[in-house]
Image: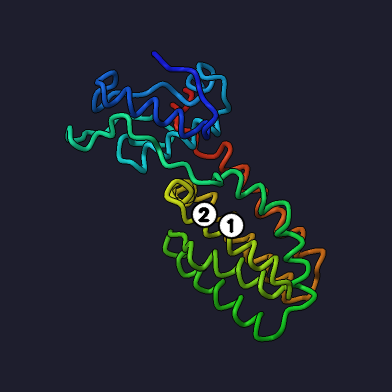
Amino acid sequence: MPFEALDSRRLYAQIADQVATLIATGEYQPGDQLPSERELAERLGVSRPTVREAMIALEVRGLIEIRVGVGIFVRAHQAQQLPGTEQVHAPRHTALEVIEARLLFEPQVAALAAERRSAADLRALRGHLRQLQLAYDQGRWSNRADRAIHETIARTSGNQVLADLVQGLFKDRDEAVALRFDEHLSQMPQVRASSFDDHRQIVEALARRDPDAARQAMHDHLASVQRAMLAGWSAEPTPD
């Protein structure tokens, strides 16, 4: 497979551009299966999560289909839809960078919120949690309710800098590639179940005004999401 040397742009964007060019030039035809994440990572000398983000970027552009547990396939398309040499838009922050940053400071935000929350704050959080449960009971995930819980906790901390940081990171999560990452994770029942229980525990810790429990619950939640992003939906054939 004729991959080229990588330059200084975002690695995942460079990989996505190379694969898009191979599709545009007919190296890969509609219905063809691309090499696995593991094989691509080995050939390019990058991490599998970097390859994963590249594949999601291509999926967002409509060039490939990721079949979780099966593989990555070139989608059928019209010639005028092919991107040619057009480069992938690479947001300033990747989905993996965002979750790493959140893991570093959101647990402390939750601890502050547990100490400072008002009765009105708790009512708002419980309302958002009910919306999250409504979606969960229907086999869905509500990104809106999820975001509302985290942003309400950040505002409840009483620190506007922290509230602005959390809001800014959720705006990064609204990027197309990050949203598709979330969509893949939300399709996994075990991830939805774990995440819903995590949010419930966070809100319960705030209700008890227990900063240590709130800090730990937020840490455990974000660490679980990070693990799922790194390894949860590998688009490779499942072993026999």
Residue 23 is drawn in which quadrant?
Answer: top left
Say which quadrant the N terminus sits in. Answer: top left
**Amino acid at circle 1:** Leu
Dot 2 and dot 1 residues touching (CB under 8 Å): yes
Which one is in front, 165 or 140?
165
Q: Which residue is mark 1?
A: 169
Residue sitting at the far front: 8
Secondary structure, mark 1, is helix
Which one is in front, 10 or 145?
10
Say above or below: 232 vs 123: above
Give the distance between the C-alpha atoms of the residues marked 2 and 1, in whole angstroms: 6 Å
Scheme of colours in the image: rainbow
* Residue 218 x, y percent position in the rendering: 70, 59
Say above or below: 65 vs 144: above
Crowding near the residue tagged with mark 1, few <14, some 14–19, many ≥20 C-alpha atoms within 10 Å: some
* Residue 168 x, y percent position in the rendering: 58, 60
* Residue 53 x, y percent position in the rendering: 49, 37
Q: Residue at x 49, y 38 (%)?
A: 233
Residue sitting at the far top: 2
Q: Which residue is mark 2?
A: 173
